[in-house]
DNA sequence: TAGCTAACGTACTGGTTCGTACATTAGTGA
DNA sequence: TCACTAATGTACGAACCAGTACGTTAGCTA
């Protein structure tokens, strides 16, 4: 996630376009995730950087494009993680459970990403729409799900009438909600969904839920 | 939701504290839901009202307190809906399914509420924490779930080891995600989760998921 | 090593935005 | 009907904030 080596300055402040750009992105990710798009301050981002506000406009053009760049990189990280997915050697039930667990873990480990997605949804996904990269980013996870699902349905193990996109939505919704709505849920119901002590419980719960749904006996229609 | 009668002015603009207050709340709800807390403009809220910005400060004190008041009313609406819940005459399985469906419907019918909750989460639920009312608002739905769950578990129908709060989280996560993340999900995966044509599909999917989870055969531990 | 350009810094501006000082009026109760 | 107060309107200020004009320098290359 952090792509900048903290004590990188080789004595006097050398010029390093890549490092400056990356540092701005790092800080901007935190600031946008912390305060939302409109709550984030370009001056604040600059202040937390070893460079100046001028450089933000030099490299990104403006606040809007900076946020888009932040989103692009954040989605890039999750896509990379998905490409590393290795569950297809397992039987369909175990594969789906493992996939759900990895999704669970990824969401938990990247709360900033969750916040960015929430923020982007408040703004109607307009930055995704404006992005060249994000339009055609695809989702390796979706392909994996598709194949596992096909195998499970063919063998008769999976009885549910879902496709990969819907199953992905189901798994994501649980993982996403737990992190995104942690604050209000905790304030209203007095239960911290991200309490480490309850982590295993929820991880198991997610797997049980998805497997139960996929393998449930259903009335033939 | 709208608590102001649109053509209410009895000829000349009469003074009506309750109406003015309610109208500000209505407009503020829309504006905050539309643009987020920091994106919302007090001047814009005032402009969309039949009164002036002065009145916002007169009745609410400031932007922060206005947002808190908006949240309080929004949560009040959902609490009221929950109090009208009438599912306990059904058997546990049907009752839970019905409850899930009602939650599903309520989320779909109140996208503004969903957005407000997302926004409040971005800000760490600080307005809920600052609110007298919201701290002790409770949740009638939780009590209903608790009783259904007890009945189902006692009769041996429900095998899952969940309590009411966790089950509520499970049901909410699906309903919430579908509405809250509609934009990014649609942009990335090309599927509109709130498409009316798919509504029944998702409503059934939610019920199937929850019931399958609750009634699944489990290895005795 | 001279010159060129990518990279960087400073200082500023113009518009926006929350909040308020001050003035005014409708309606009510004595 | 008169006075008092809750309710309302106007006009303005001070801070904030995204964005930029202009000037500077490091480091590479011819």
Image (tube, coloured by chain):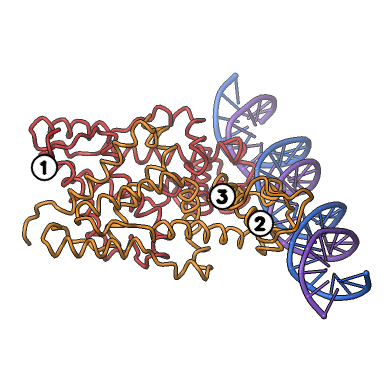
Chain colours: A orange, B red, C blue, D purple
CA distance for labels 1 and 3: 44 Å
Q: Which quadrant is home to the C terminus of chain A?
A: bottom left
User: Does B168 appear above or below B112?
Assistant: above
- In front of the other: label 1 or label 2? 2
On whether disc 1 and disc 2 are found on a single subunit, the reply is no
Q: Chain of mark 2?
A: A
Question: Which residue corresponds to the image point at 32% horizontal and 63% vertical from the top-left?
Answer: A142
Residues beneath discs 1 and 3 located on the same chain:
no
The residue drawn where x is 22% and y is 43% is: B99
The chain carrying label 1 is B
Q: Which residue is mark 2?
A: A19
| Residue beneath the point at 47% across and 59% down | A75
Please give left or right for residue B89 compared with residue B126 in the image: left
Name the residue beneath numbered marker 3. A2
Question: Residue C20: image x %, image y %?
Answer: 72, 36
Q: Element type at marker 1?
A: loop
The answer to which of marks 2 and 3 sits earlier in the sequence is 3
Say which element carries label 2: helix
Residue B30 circle label:
none
* Helix, strand or loop under label 3: loop
For the residues labelled 2 and 3, the Cα–Cα distance comes to: 11 Å
Q: Nearer the viewer, residue B182 or B220?
A: B220
Circle 1 Cα neighbour tier, 10 Å, few/some/many (<14 / 14–19 / ≥20): few
Q: Image quadrant of residue C16?
A: bottom right
Q: Which residue is mark 1?
A: B217
Q: Nearer the viewer, residue C26 or B133?
A: B133
Local crowd size for mark 3, using a 10 Å CA cut-off: few (<14), some (14–19), many (≥20): few
Q: Are marks 2 and 3 in contact (CB under 8 Å)?
A: no
Mark 1 vs mark 2, CA separation in Å: 55 Å
- Residues at marks 1 and 2 touching, judged by CB atoms closer than 8 Å: no
- Expressed as whole percent of the image width and height from the top left, the position of residue B67 reads 53, 41
């Amino acid at each position: 996630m952090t792509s900048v080596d903290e004590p990188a300055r080789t004595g006097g402040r050398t010029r390093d376009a890549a490092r400056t750009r990356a540092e701005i992105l790092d800080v901007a990710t935190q600031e946008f995730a912390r305060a939302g798009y409109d709550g984030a301050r370009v001056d604040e981002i600059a202040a937390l950087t070893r460079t100046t506000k001028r450089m933000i406009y030099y490299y990104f053009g403006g606040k809007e494009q900076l946020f888009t760049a932040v989103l692009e990189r954040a989605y890039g990280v999750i896509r990379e993680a998905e490409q590393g997915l290795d569950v297809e050697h397992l039987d369909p039930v175990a594969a789906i459970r493992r996939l759900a667990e990895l999704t669970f873990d990824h969401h938990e480990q990247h709360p900033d990403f969750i916040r960015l997605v929430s923020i982007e949804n408040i703004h109607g996904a307009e930055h995704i729409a404006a992005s060249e990269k994000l339009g055609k980013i695809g989702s390796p996870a979706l392909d994996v799900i598709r194949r596992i699902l096909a195998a499970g349905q063919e063998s008769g193990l999976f009885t549910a009438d879902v496709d990969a996109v819907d199953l992905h939505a189901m798994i994501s919704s649980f993982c996403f909600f737990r992190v995104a709505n942690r604050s209000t849920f905790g304030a209203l119901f007095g239960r911290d969904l991200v309490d480490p002590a309850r982590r295993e419980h929820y991880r198991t719960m997610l797997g049980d839920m998805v497997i139960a749904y996929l393998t449930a006996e259903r009335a033939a229609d």
